[in-house]
Amino acid sequence: MISLVLVGAAGRMGRAVEEAARAAGDFELRALVDRAPLPPAGPPAPGRAALWTDDARAVIRGRDVVIEFSSPESCRGIAALCAERGASLVSGTSGLSAEDENVLRAAARKVPVLRASNFSLGVAALHRALESALKALPRGWDVEIIERHHRKKADSPSGTALSLASLALAARGLPAGALRHGREGRVGERPTDEIGVHAVRGGSWVGDHAVLIAGEGEWIELRHVAQDRGAFAAGALAAARFVARAGPGLYTLSDVLRG
Ligand code: NAD
């Protein structure tokens, strides 16, 4: 059994991971951490209140696997705490700064840390499809990324849109400055060496990423739609099983898919 601590347990992703972990059968849920009080509605399970805490320092210990979907400041603190206690970390929070990423890298020198801006298998396949489409097409084809998420999402564009954009930049040999976040006003003709990124917010969209690759008189759309957070939760649990056996290091979902 894998000893599991869940950080951000009151959140949308936290609840999805808790439900998936309870159903999986190979996780022992040791603590549910959130600064918010225990929500009245949640996965129905006896003893849930006893696992609830707002104090990660009081619960995380060596040999735990910690899964966090919370906020950048929480991610930083949890990464440092995992390194101090010898616990493994699966981190899913998006919108991390370069400084936050450095804290994860520092923790990964002591414990296994797996970081992914998107835990779905479909998005991993979308990355591969985009890479091969861009290899097959001339530079004159324009690349535009459109992502849609629920109205409560804090960061824009999504971490997944940014990772698709950085793949497109690398495939085209373009610098980060070639990203064009939205357009407004008399912007003139679209330069070829530009990657457009557009964030749409509203309603309850779980996550939708489309990459349009437009040529003369034809275009391709590569698109992934997450209909249910269970898709991310399953990937996070696969990552948890991976880090439970891994040595210190910074891993990605590709390491899990390679097995
Ligand atoms: P949410 O707002 O529903 O939940 C976040 C939870 O974290 C909240 O309950 C909040 O109280 C808690 N939290 C935040 N800061 C905290 C702190 N300092 N201490 C204790 N608890 C704290 O958000 P969500 O939709 O569950 O998403 C959480 C994060 O995961 C976001 O950054 C989101 O973009 C990201 N996300 C990643 C993936 C992925 O596959 N990697 C998928 C979906 C969402």
Image (spheres, rainbow, N blue to C red):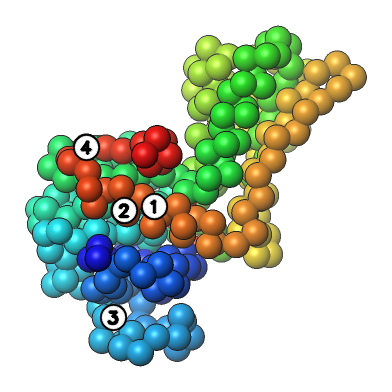
The amino acid type of the residue labelled 4 equals Gly
The reply to whether dot 4 and dot 3 touch (C-beta < 8 Å) is: no
Q: Where does the C terminus fall, quadrant-wise?
A: top left
- Residue type at tag 1: Ala
For discs 3 and 1, the disc positioned in front in the rendered view: 1
Q: Residue at x 78, y 23 (%)?
A: 214
- Residue 238 got which mark? 1
State the separation of the CA atoms marked 1 and 2: 5 Å
Q: Is residue 75 visible?
A: yes
In the image, 156 versus 259, the foreground residue is 259
The residue that disc 3 covers is: 52
- The crowd level at tag 4 (other Cα within 10 Å; few <14, some 14-19, many 20+) is some
Nearest to viewer (mark 4 / mark 1): 1
Category of crowding for the residue at label 2, using alpha-carbon neighbours closer than 10 angstroms: few (below 14), some (14–19), many (at least 20): some
Query: Helix, strand or loop at disc 2?
Result: helix
Whether pointer 3 and pointer 1 mark residues with C-beta atoms closer than 8 Å, the reply is no
Instruction: Return the residue at label 2.
Output: 241
How crowded is the residue under tag 3: few (<14 C-alpha within 10 Å), some, or many (20+)? many
Residue 92, percent from left and from top: 40, 52
